[in-house]
Amino acid sequence: MNEERKSLFRTALRFGLLGGIVAFYISAIGMTETFSQRYLIGSTLSMGHVFITVGAIGAGIMTARAFREERKLKVLGSGLLAGLLSSIPLVILIFLIRILVIPQVGQDVTFRWRDMLVNFSPALVELLTFGQGLTAGIPILIVLLTVLAGLASALVWLPLRWRSAFISGIIWTLGVGVFSENVGQIVRQIFGRGLLKFMFAGKSLNPVAAGLIFVIAFGVTYFRVLGRARSQWQVLPPTVQTQGRRLGILLGLAFLLALPWGVGLFLS
């Protein structure tokens, strides 16, 4: 029993800290603050919020996949633990800014930390604490990441068809929100301004329209035939599947390393 608990903790620790480091990195290079004003749905969910939570959600999913053959309670517990651990790097980031950067604001000092850590700003602390200050904001951050990771881990329980449909609904909804300007132009040209005004408020999705997009994407994915591609993957030798997963991880890391360059192009 002790070995099982140690295995659960090690796995949750590995994926939790990995997810937290990803979120730390995205914030440290300035993406979280830069895109915090780019709202995807209404005036509540921004790309900054997505960047804050994406590491915990990924940690919950990866940890749950490692224990998919175990009891549901163990899967959920591992996901919650991974989410809790994923908050550690972000909490450290908050205190680094609070200790190193904020005391120097408006002060005449020889060495200014902000000159070296250019994206470690008081505004980033406000984002990470949801404008609630350290006392309330840090617990909110920890609880939110823990809950989201737990919910993400619960996806493993769902039948494959339901899980694929749910993920597809989320991806399509967020995707339309991210590319709202392009989608808006297409909608205006084909359907006119009436539908455009219903779907978008400024550059963000109307919450009702977001819900409809989710339902449509969910339904289309649920009822379409997905078996062919999945069957082709499942018949591959285990070594090939492992190599494919490793390639996916390497591509993901390459994407993260290219983010600063991409953000620079976007801002220019």
Image (spheres, rainbow, N blue to C red):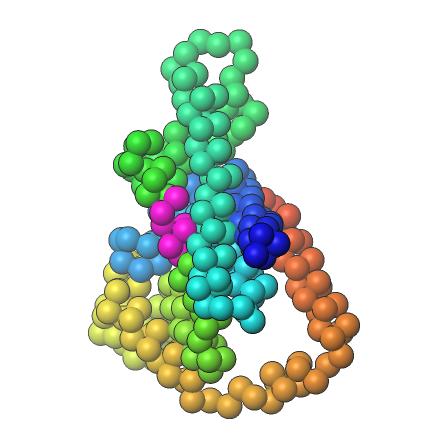
> Dividing the picture into quarters, in which one does residue 129 lie?
top left
Q: Which residue is most to the front?
A: 1
Q: Main secondary structure of the magenta part?
A: helix
Q: Position of residue 96 (x, y in %)?
A: 48, 27
Q: Position of residue 236 (x, y in %)?
A: 73, 81
Count of numbered circles in the view: 0
Magenta-colored span: 142-148
Q: Quadrant of the N terminus?
A: bottom right
Whether residue 41 is visible: yes
Q: Is residue 64 above or below residue 2?
A: below
Q: Position of residue 199 (x, y in %)?
A: 27, 69
Q: Is residue 55 above or below residue 166?
A: above
13 vs 251, left or right, is left
Q: Residue at x 37, y 43 (%)?
A: 141
163 vs 139, left or right, is right
Q: Nearer the viewer, residue 119 or 127?
A: 127
Q: Residue at x 29, y 36 (%)?
A: 136
